[in-house]
């Protein structure tokens, strides 16, 4: 009997961990391996929650003016002080997060989708289409980015004056980004297109559309996510730059960029809190988004796995 038990030991069946457990373990591992990336994710999540619950977080109307409360330093009532028109700076910072989030997310989505389509088509079709598209990319990348953004914003704002400024900024950011990112995704698609499973799919009669949608596109998901995460912070900074120069969101809308340009520059010595608030918020969000994007690149890029 003892020999039988030794020859056939009872195996204990271990149930796989539940989905919440797996998510918790993955998040814990990410935080341990990439502390700066986890910090960036926390900052990005804070931006999202602030934008969503701006109505609840803001103490006052961001556009409400009162000369009786003009240029009050930060205190228990006005957490970030007030500007020269008596508007609460904390409320304007909170609503400014909504504008930044809208521009960042919309520009990423509007830029990454056509960029992916152009990159996959350019790599898979090749020939004249690939040559002409790459020359267009060369021409666009030869123009300084800020000049191109200003030119697109002016043209769109002049021809379509009824379009909100946020939408014009999103379009101005997405158009050159889609064309530039198509080159990166073209390189990733070319590597996938030379793979054996793509050759096998063609050999059994798979159409070009099926090969691109079922074999090429799913295998370039990692570079797409990396590009989107890195572009998010860049778009927020670009929107603030355009607004600071007067070509983006216009006053009195609470954009961080025009807050730095109008109130911040005019009262940087008499009321420095008008400069500190939007500058710190913009710096933290862009830094957090970049750190989170870098961490995602290290985790998702197979070429970086195993490297320290």
Image: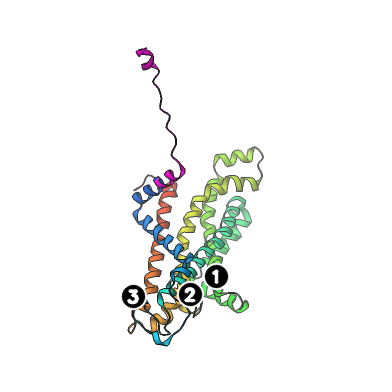
Identify the residue under disc 1: 172
- Would you say residue 4 sits in the magenta stretch? yes
Identify the residue under disc 3: 76
User: Under tag 1, what secondary structure?
Assistant: helix
Q: Which mark is residue 141?
A: none
Identify the residue under disc 2: 242
Q: Are marks 2 and 1 in contact (CB under 8 Å)?
A: yes
Residue 162 location, x and y as percent? 61, 77
The answer to which of 3 and 173 lies nearer the viewer is 3
In which image quadrant can residue 166 be found?
bottom right
The answer to which of 285 and 300 lies nearer the viewer is 285
Instruction: Point out the stretch of residues depicted in magenta.
Output: 1-24
Any part of residue 170 in sight? yes
Tell me if 116 is positioned left or right of 307 in this view. right
Up the image or down, 91 lies above or below 65; here it is above
Q: Are marks 3 and 2 in contact (CB under 8 Å)?
A: no
Alpha-carbon neighbours of circle 2 within 10 Å: few (<14), some, or many (≥20)?
many
How was this image coloured?
Answer: rainbow
Q: Earlier in the sequence, mark 3 or mark 1?
A: 3
Gap between marks 3 and 2 measured at Cα? 33 Å
Q: Please give the name of the residue rendered at 43% of the width and 60% of the height, measured from the top-left corner.
A: 45
In which image quadrant can residue 280 be found?
bottom left
Residue 121 location, x and y as percent? 61, 53
Q: Which of labels 3 and 2 is toward the front?
A: 3
């Amino acid at each position: 009997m003892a020999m039988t038990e030794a020859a056939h030991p009872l195996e204990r069946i271990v149930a796989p961990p539940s989905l919440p457990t797996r998510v918790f373990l993955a998040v814990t591992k990410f935080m341990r391996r990439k502390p700066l990336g986890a910090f960036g994710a926390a900052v990005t999540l804070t931006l999202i929650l602030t934008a969503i619950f701006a109505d609840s977080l803001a103490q006052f109307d961001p556009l409400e003016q009162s000369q009786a409360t003009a240029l009050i330093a930060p205190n228990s009532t006005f957490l970030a002080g007030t500007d020269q028109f008596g508007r609460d700076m904390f409320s304007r910072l909170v609503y400014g997060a909504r504008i930044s989030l809208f521009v960042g997310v919309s520009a990423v989505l509007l830029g990454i989708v056509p960029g992916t389509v152009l990159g996959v088509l350019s790599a898979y079709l090749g020939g004249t289409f690939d040559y002409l598209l790459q020359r267009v990319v060369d021409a666009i990348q030869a123009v300084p980015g800020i000049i191109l953004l200003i030119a697109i914003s002016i043209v769109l704002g002049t021809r379509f004056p009824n379009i909100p400024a946020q939408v014009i900024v999103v379009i101005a950011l997405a158009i050159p980004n889609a064309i530039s990112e198509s080159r990166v995704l073209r390189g990733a698609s070319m590597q996938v297109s030379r793979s054996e499973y793509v050759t096998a799919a063609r050999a059994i009669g798979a159409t070009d559309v099926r090969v691109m949608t079922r074999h090429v596109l799913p295998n370039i998901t990692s570079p797409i996510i990396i590009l989107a995460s890195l572009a998010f912070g860049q778009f927020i900074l670009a929107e603030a730059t355009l607004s600071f120069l007067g070509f983006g969101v216009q006053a009195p809308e609470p954009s961080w960029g025009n807050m730095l340009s109008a109130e911040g520059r005019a009262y940087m010595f008499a009321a420095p809190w008008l400069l500190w608030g939007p500058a710190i918020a913009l710096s933290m969000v862009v830094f957090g988004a970049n750190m989170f994007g870098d961490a995602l690149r290290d985790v998702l890029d197979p070429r970086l796995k195993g490297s320290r």
